[in-house]
Image (cartoon, grey):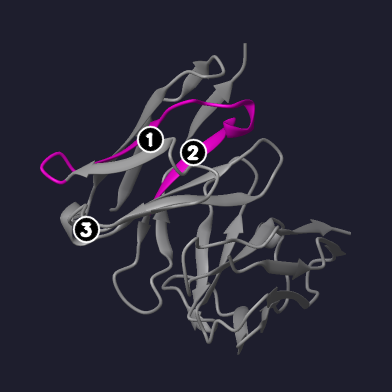
Amino acid sequence: DIQLTQSPSFLSASVGDSVTITCRASQGISSYLAWYQQEPGKAPKLLIYSASTLQSGVPSRFSGSGSGTEFTLTISSLQPEDFATYYCQQLDSYPRTFGQGTKVEIK
Amino acid sequence: EVQLVESGGGLVQPGGSLRLSCAASGFTFSSYSMTWVRQAPGKGLEWVSVIARDGATTYYAESGKGRFTISRDNSKSTLYLQMNSLRAEDTAVYHCARKMSSGTYPLDNWGQGTLVTVSS
């Protein structure tokens, strides 16, 4: 199985900050990676797929990059509604594993 | 509007069985592969299983192999997860999710989930 390791697991930031979350895969997965946002008590929401394609309706302050084994999610100018937990998921092979999550909290 | 509504969760004793359902609406259900993802209390997301559009192909996480069975009824636009020999570690919120039909096939719509608690 492909393992995904996110870093950091937790980060504290202020409104207006730019933050970057990294997701590393245990083997190459080309661009077969998605990012999801989950607010407390809610279902996950798709943000980005194919490593860098923004899902329809997602604000442009979210961006993704990377290929192979290293990927990043960047949120420029954090907004209050962005404080949530973020997960990466590999779409290369089954089982479609997730990273352990990165919780973004208000400083 | 795409809607996915799970049901069937509840309290079950270890070794027991439960069948979860996911009622889909707002899209042509038979045109999409469907997935179950679970989340234990306070933990991260865990992929559980996927089923192809016609139900002919399925895959499972190791944690559910031999115990869980995913199925679908396209005439009823409903996805199922039959869970047998349940263990305490199966306690989680179970979400159904639609697999996008293009690109790299991420999960583009999710239900709110149904809570399964395995405890004596």
Q: Are marks 2 and 1 on the same chain?
A: yes
Cα–Cα span, label 2 and label 1: 8 Å
Q: In the rendered structure, which amino acid carries the disc numbered 1? A: Glu
Q: Position of residue A91 (x, y in %)?
A: 48, 71
Q: Secondary structure at mark 3?
A: loop
For label 1, count other residues whose C-alpha is less than 10 Å away and answer few (under 14), some (14-19) or many (20+): many
Q: Secondary structure at mark 2?
A: strand
Q: Quadrant of the C terminus of chain B?
A: top right
Q: In this picture, which residue range is highlighted in magenta?
A: B74-97
Q: Position of residue A95 (x, y in %)?
A: 50, 60
Residue located beneath label 1 in the image: B6
Q: How many marks?
A: 3
Q: In the rendered structure, which amino acid carries the disc numbered 3? A: Arg
Circle nearer the N terminus (2, 1): 1
The answer for which chain carries disc 2 is B
Compared to residue A67, the image places residue B83 above or below, namely above
Residue sitting at the far front: B66
For label 3, count other residues whose C-alpha is less than 10 Å away and answer few (under 14), some (14-19) or many (20+): some
